[in-house]
Image (tube, helix red, strand yellow):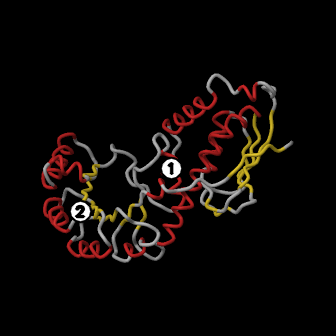
């Protein structure tokens, strides 16, 4: 993961939201020059995610931080284990504690659920995609957690791909109008973006194939049953990637993979994940 402006903006805003005009609990009883040590305790089994983020947060607040990773992101974690040790200004430890835990607990929950889905795809060519069904202003870390758990990041936002969904198609007056308008837009503005088209039935698939050749790179099969996906794949020639989406869960994901579809996208990886229990505890030096 690249830690650019967006990441540090997220950290700045999160710390400002929590600290406000001062961490008065810490200011009232801990000398500003005091340094201390803390350990991240794992209290629930799962997949660890966010340890690298934690290190970046502590170093960002206190460049003199000494961070010792005891486990790596993506590793299976067991209750009772330690993920890392950190030695820094006590003010830094206490001010960053909740932000670090919020990030790691959420990310570890997502990575754990993602791994459960990814494991079901073992032995199949089908890859697991996330979606834009994310928490506002936290998408960067949620999608990183999906990657750590074994998934593949789909588009990050509205700006890095053209995805023509049902509402775009309805407003445009049909698949043909939507594809042609999007293609002309890309040529006019000299944009190097890929076009994906959503289809909702076999007729839509046929239209997308006829109109989209040389323009569309991926056809989404939305709310198709596995049987309908298999039928659609017989029509779709080489030159198009395929994605099944909608209603895919742990119980049926293997049925979709067995059709040979290139991708399955699952919003539940993020919006149905449960945070895992972690705690940051002071250690006396």
Q: In this view, does 189 lie to the left or right of 95?
A: left
Estimate the x, y position of residue 225 in percent, counting from the top left. 31, 71
Q: Is residue 201 left or right of residue 19?
A: left
Q: Nearer the viewer, residue 43 or 186?
A: 43
Between residue 280 and residue 167, name the one nearer to us: 167
Q: Identify the residue at image location x=41%, y=50%.
A: 133
Q: Where is residue 185 in the image (x, y as percent from the top left)?
A: 19, 43
Quarter occupied by residue 13: top right
Please determine whether, in this image, residue 103 is positioned above or below residue 222. Answer: above
**Disc 1, SS:** helix
Q: Quadrant of the C terminus?
A: top right
Q: Residue furthest top?
A: 21
**Residue identified by numbered label 1:** 142
* Residue occupying the far right of the picture: 285
User: Total marks drawn?
Assistant: 2
> How crowded is the residue under tag 2: few (<14 C-alpha within 10 Å), some, or many (20+)?
some
For the residues carrying marks 1 and 2, which lies nearer the camera in this image? 2
3 horizontally vs 263: left or right? right
Circle 2: element type: loop
> What residue appears at the point 75 percent right and 37 percent down from the top-left corner?
88
- Expressed as whole percent of the image width and height from the top left, the position of residue 210 reads 13, 63
Q: Work out whether mark 1 precedes mark 2 in sequence or the reverse, and give the earlier one.
A: 1
Query: Taking 13 as reference, is 232 above or below it?
Result: below
Residue 50: x, y in percent? Answer: 60, 50
Q: Residue 245 is drawn in which quadrant?
A: bottom left
The residue beneath circle 2 is 200
Spatial distance from mark 1 to mark 2, Cα to Cα?
A: 28 Å
Mark 1 Cα shell of 10 Å, populated few (<14), some (14-19), many (≥20) = many
The correct choice, above or below, for 283 with respect to 45 in the image is above
């Amino acid at each position: 993961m690249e830690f650019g402006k967006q990441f540090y903006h997220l950290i700045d805003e999160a710390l400002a939201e929590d600290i406000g005009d001062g961490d008065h609990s810490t200011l009232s009883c801990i000398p500003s020059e005091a340094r201390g040590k803390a350990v991240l305790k794992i209290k629930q089994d799962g997949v660890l995610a966010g340890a690298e983020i934690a290190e970046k947060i502590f170093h960002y607040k206190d460049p003199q931080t000494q961070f010792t990773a005891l486990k790596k992101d993506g590793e299976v974690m067991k209750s009772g284990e330690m993920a890392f040790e950190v030695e820094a200004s006590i003010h830094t430890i206490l001010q960053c504690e909740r932000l670090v835990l919020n990030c790691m607990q959420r990310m570890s929950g997502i990575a754990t659920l993602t791994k459960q889905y990814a494991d079901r795809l073992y032995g199949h060519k089908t890859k697991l995609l996330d979606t834009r069904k994310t928490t506002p202003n936290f998408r960067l870390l949620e999608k990183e957690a999906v990657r750590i758990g074994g998934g593949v990041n789909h588009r990050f936002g509205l700006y890095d791909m053209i995805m023509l969904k049902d509402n775009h198609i309805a407003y445009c007056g049909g698949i043909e109008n939507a594809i042609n308008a999007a293609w002309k837009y890309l040529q006019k503005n000299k944009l190097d973006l890929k076009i994906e088209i959503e289809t909702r039935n076999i007729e839509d698939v046929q239209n997308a194939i006829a109109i989209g050749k040389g323009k569309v790179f991926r056809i989404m099969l939305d709310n198709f049953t596995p049987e309908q996906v298999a039928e659609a794949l017989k029509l779709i020639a080489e030159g198009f990637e395929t994605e099944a989406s909608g209603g895919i869960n742990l119980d049926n994901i293997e049925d979709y993979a067995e059709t040979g579809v290139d991708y399955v996208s699952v919003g539940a990886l993020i919006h149905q994940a449960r945070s895992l229990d972690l705690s940051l505890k002071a250690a006396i030096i």
